[in-house]
Amino acid sequence: MNPDQLIQHYKMEKHPEGGAFLETYRSPLSATFEGFSGDRACSTGILFLLQQGEISAFHKIKSDEMWHFYLGEPLEVIEIDLTGRLIRTILGSDILQGQHLQYTVKAGHWFASHSLGKFSLVGCTVAPGFDFQDFVMAKRSQLVSEYPQHQEPITKFTY
């Protein structure tokens, strides 16, 4: 399959951070979680597609987000943890070369991603479930001001 076929097959929409997505699961169970305003679904899941040249721009959410590799070329996740450390993780099927089938970005970390080839199809599972009111898109100038040692990847992965 090619990216256009995947987008058409799954009826994917553009995501504000970049790429295309489809929500595939939203738990019918909800609860109030500490640090969140109002109830959240206990878990949510999406399919997420990035094509060559597209980025998922730096953003953060209030929940842990587990990434799952499915199809295409490897995908790189770049994150800045709560101590300011830059972490680069490759999702892909070549586990003997250090790629990961799954990887979890912890709540509150800034993170971005991009495909290392023609396209990458991944899944993302968020718990407590994703809600756009918990989503913060990075402002380039603010992120560079906070983490000047990471100016290059911040500039590359922000709009």
Image: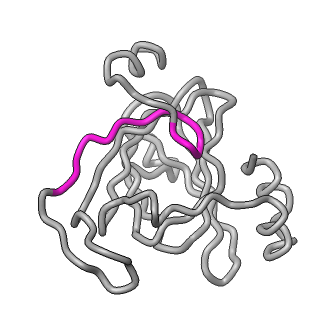
> Image check: 45 left or right of 76?
left
Residue drawn 46% across and 63% down? Answer: 133
User: Is 26 within the magenta?
Assistant: yes
Residue at point 18% right, 68% down?
A: 30
**Is 53 above or below relative to 111?**
above
In the image, 31 versus 150, the foreground residue is 31
| Residue at the image point whose x is 53% and y is 38% from the top | 74
Farthest left residue?
28
Q: Which x, y percent locates residue 57?
A: 65, 49
Q: Position of residue 14 (x, y in %)?
A: 51, 32
89 in relation to 31, above or below: above
Q: Position of residue 8 (x, y in %)?
A: 38, 16
Q: Magenta segment: does it hold 98? A: no
Image-quadrant location for residue 93: top left
Quarter location, residue 147: bottom right
The magenta stretch is: 15-27
Is residue 127 left or right of 110 when viewed as pictured? left
User: Quarter holding the N terminus?
Assistant: top left
